[in-house]
Amino acid sequence: MSKHYHLIIIIGLAVTVAGCSKPADKQTQTPPKGAGPAARVSGEILVFVPCGVAGPYGEIKKLFEAKYPGVKVTQELANIDVQTKLILDGKAAPDMWIALGDREMNRVKEAGKVAGEPVTFAYNSIAFTVHKNNPCGIASLQDLTKPSVKTIALATPENSSGYYAEQAFRQAGVWEQVEKKIWLTPEPAQVKVALSSGKAEVGVVYYPCARETRIMGGEPEEMKGKLQLLNKFPEDVAKPFPAQAAVIQGCANPEGGKVFLDFMLSDEVQDVWEKWAFDRAKQPASGKRVVLYMYCGAGIRPMMDAAIEAFKQVRPNVRIDVGYAGSGCLLGQLTFGKRGDLYMPGEDFYLNQAMDRGYIASSKPIGYFEPVLLVAKGNPKNIKTLQDLTRPGLKVALGDAKACAVGLTADRLLGKAGLAEKVEKNVAVRHGNVPELGNAVKFRTIDVSIVWNVTATQQLEDCDSIPIDRKYYEPSLAPIGLLKFSKHSEEAQAFIDFLAGPEGQKIVADSGMTPAAGSKAAGSGS
């Protein structure tokens, strides 16, 4: 490795791991001839689980225990590098170990610690993480050579994320220029810590880890705080790599571990890995699964989630994986990744930019966003018009015009009303996406915000909305685009047509957005 690398040494990290030996009565007995898999598994199964997959593992454990009710599954959660070292040092022998990639597994296999052969249960990918709103303007791997990018955080090449990142940099022809910027850690989880603390401008993470949850069995979460997921590495430099699991030599319940290992390839478990942004290792028995990727504005998540759920009933073999973010962030992700199938930002301003860059094959209007004033329930500040936002002492929240469409619209309409400078004096915060604006009013950290009608509908229990005179704005068209990169354009177009059809338009209207079909938005006043 280069002498310019800075290696973090993790000292004093202790992980309590169950011992390799278990009481004799928990050993699996030889099953009778012809017995099914349930007869081969009993007692307790110890699984080593990397922290980054606590969410999917929790779901898988429930499925396994439901199928094998006489078996108790226990687990040890720790960072992948810690688990690898414990196994290599002979200090732990779990009945099954889940690894995030093949690099970690190969080290253990080469040391003779794997019983049988590892099983590829899914395919993992690497992705870039950057600071919120991508301040360094990373739009390609070549942009890593910019002077503004001083430090790139990676895991060491003993980890799959670090190894495949280095290979991608070499493939893209930027390795020699960025090598001196690399900051290494043996613990992949520390990459996001380095970014959050300002030690790096860019980091490489496992793509599914961007949605990880610390709650075992919890739901996927979008990246929060100061960071944002930029996108996966382009596939021409970094293809998905095997995520593997194995029974470890010398474990207490190898038969139980093998049954769990086989279970990882069942349709129901493959569905779980796919839900958490891994690629399937095995297609479902019902036929090939098509996975679409959509870039979608964060403000319409409830509507889009409902539409996707309804579409499943029409096309059960089509899964739609969605990345939600502010419209400005979405455009940056699309520009960097140049991958995916569908694009639905907050308004046509952003779709037109994508079209100008040659990313859009076709588009169709789905509805209209209309800005409203959002206030606390009962309107305690008695806010009635835009003019009221200029009152001294009032705390106003607006969207960041560079990050989300509603911020751009708010700036435009305040300018048209001649109130921009006066209102700006009362702006306490600018948020990067519209849900944060809604929450700011809900939790009463501010008095009023300008949000979309669909956002106001989501906050009806805690907030009231006040219409804005339409002479100050034009309803914002909400189109959905079919991306030129799509590998499944037929299925992607089917979803677009579904959204534009009767059932999809009803979902749009129920969400609070003005539907495109028979829209009242063509009118001139309100």
Image (spheres, rainbow, N blue to C red):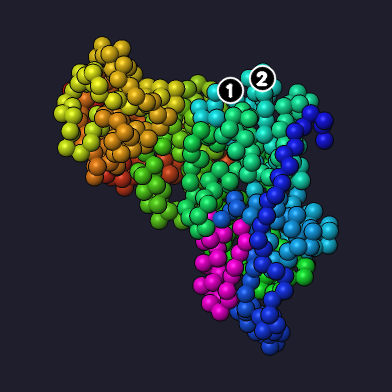
Element carrying mark 1: loop
Residue that numbered label 1 is attached to: 136
Quadrant location of residue 419? top left
Quadrant location of residue 459? top left
The residue drawn where x is 20% and y is 39% is: 377
Q: Nearer the viewer, residue 88 or 282?
A: 88
Q: Residue 257: x percent and y percent?
A: 67, 70
Residue that numbered label 2 is attached to: 146
Q: Residue 357: x percent and y percent?
A: 53, 22
Image height check: is 134 above or below 236?
above
Q: Amino acid at mark 1?
A: Cys
The residue drawn where x is 28% and y is 25% is: 395
Asked whether the residues under the numbered discs 2 and 1 touch, taking CB atoms below 8 Å apart as contact, a structural biologist would say yes
- Left/right placement of residue 389 relative to residue 263 reads left
Residue 154 is a magenta residue? no
- Left/right placement of residue 225 relative to residue 464 reads right
Viewer can see residue 366:
no
Mark 2 burial class by Cα count in 10 Å: few <14, some 14-19, many 20+: few
Q: Which mark is residue 434?
A: none
Looking at the image, is mark 2 or mark 1 earlier in the sequence? 1
Q: Residue 521: x percent and y percent?
A: 24, 28
Q: Nearer the viewer, residue 239 or 99?
A: 99
Q: Which image quadrant: the C terminus?
A: top left
Mark 1 burial class by Cα count in 10 Å: few <14, some 14-19, many 20+: some
Element carrying mark 2: loop
Q: Which image quadrant: the N terminus?
A: top right
What is the magenta range? 55-77
The residue drawn where x is 24% and y is 42% is: 462
Q: Amino acid at mark 2?
A: Lys
Q: Residue 447: x percent and y percent?
A: 26, 30
Residue 66 is a magenta residue? yes
Which residue extends farthest bottom? Answer: 32
